[in-house]
Amino acid sequence: MGRLELANDVLDAQLVSRRDEKIGRVDSLLLELRQGRPPRVSAILMGGPVRAEREGRPFVWLSRALRAVLRIRRSGVTRLEFAKVLRIAECVRVDAEERDIEAEYVEHWLASHVVCRMPGAGGDQK
Amino acid sequence: MKKWGELALGVVTSIGGFLEVGSIATSAQAGAEFGYQLAWALLLGTIGLAVLMEASGRLAAVSGRTYADLLRERFGIRFFMLPLVALLLVSFLVLASEIGGVSLALQFVTGVNLRWWALPVALLGWGLLWRGTFSAVEQGTAGLGLVALMFAVAAVKMHPQWGMLGRALLPSIPHHEPARYWYLVISILGASISPYLFVFYSAGAIEDGWSPEHLVVNKVTAGLGNLFGGGLAIAVLVVAALVLAPRHIRIDSYAQVPLMLSQPLGKAGVLLFAGTLFITCFGATVEIVLAMAYALAQGFGWPWSENLRPGKDSRFASSYTVFLFFAALIIVIGVDPLALTNISMVLTAASLPVTVVPLLVLMNDRTLLRRYVNGPFANTALVVLALMSVVVLVAALPLQLTGGG
């Protein structure tokens, strides 16, 4: 049985899917307060708005302004149940796929609407 | 045999990486205004960069993680934004200067104003990044960068006073214009020790699949490569000191820089200078913009690799595309490349504390580096660099105002 420090080893760590895709970072951790029982870490939160809250007020304003200007209606926040964590080492592996992650929609949108329309963008390795 | 190939490539890449528009401009200005006297600042910058590159390469080779990745994980998002924003802002200005440098080389050869060249240059860099792999970026510019050796040839042909040059490798107090002297010291340090270089270097170590077996390659690349690169920057200073200083010619625009080569190398000097400027600045352009995209992607956990097709890491690829385009626009609207270079070198020097101090902390983390953590020598060198970077931060603005003109 090992021991981990939440703030040092889990918060801000790289998240990878069960297929080893990079799917963002642990932007925040949700602590659930339960009546008559000890609190427990219930979920990993990820996405720009969550990150901005931790970065500081100017970044919250910037994030809100960008969302308003670009008319983004999607929340951009993903809540991953902590029970989905498969392994914590140098990165946190979770039982999820990239397409399940709301916060990754920018990657998909850019890929399908912009990048893949340009020559030489498709395929895996160069 | 493969190891020797890697060593040679690493050294050649470092030479090309060291010499770019910033180091050429600041070394030439220093030589023209203060003779050999500022050679010590170039030596200090060279040693400083070698120490930082060795450390970031060792960190990546042993931990298998990049510097930007660890900055985010170990220091948290709130702190991470500080070096990230500083790196992006400063590197953006340096990127525009480098695009200006490539465009200027084309202006020397074609006579067409550099503003017309900025967007085609950005497009050429983008094409290499979009279609090429990491080793194409690394090797494509490395070998050609050896054309910069002509500065060494020019310096030797001028028969410098070696004894005087040797004495100038030790710091000395200026006899005139102290504010300008110290301003140039900071510019030289900024031109030598650019944070983008060690962000790029640590990401490159991961792209090349480095392991602890590569620690020798890392030491030689960082040490010998930078020593050669720094030696070439000193050669620029020597030529400027021998050609421009006796005639009291100060460098007020880039157009004057190739003229200093026409005495030792004749007409070919101008062409060789244009070639050197083109290749070294183009190499720096792709490295800087990659470093910016690496820092963003690694800090936010996006997929990233120069070896993946852009469709597989679309935010990473879009980042370098956008940065290149807007940096080129700065040159298109007519900002003077020399003024831009000078201001970006001072800002680079001022941004050093937020990138150097965390490296010192990480290099002592046994969970990351195991038995390869910093020894007393490497720690002393990094502490001295960190203290120096704080002094530079405090002095940068007053010196920009008093000595920058």
Image: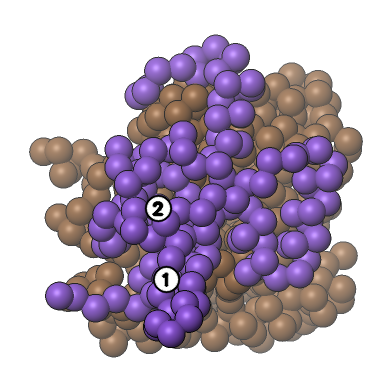
Return the disc, 2 or 1, that comes first in the chain's sequence.
2
Q: Quadrant of the N terminus of chain B?
A: top left
> What residue would you read off at disc 1?
A41
Q: Amino acid at mark 2?
A: Leu
Front residue of this view, candidates B141 and B92: B92
Q: Residue furthest toward the left?
A: B1
Mark number displayed over residue A15: 2
Q: Which chain is brown?
A: B
Farthest residue toward the front? Answer: A36
Quadrant for the C terminus of chain B, please: bottom right
Left or right: B248 in relation to B85: right
Horizontal side, residue A87 vs residue B76: left or right: left
Characterize the local packing of mark 1: few (<14), some (14-19) or many (20 or more) Cα atoms within 10 angstroms.
some
CB atoms at circles 2 and 1 under 8 Å apart? no
Assign a secondary structure to mark 1. strand
**Please, which chain is the residue tagged with disc 2 on?**
A
The letter of the purple chain is A
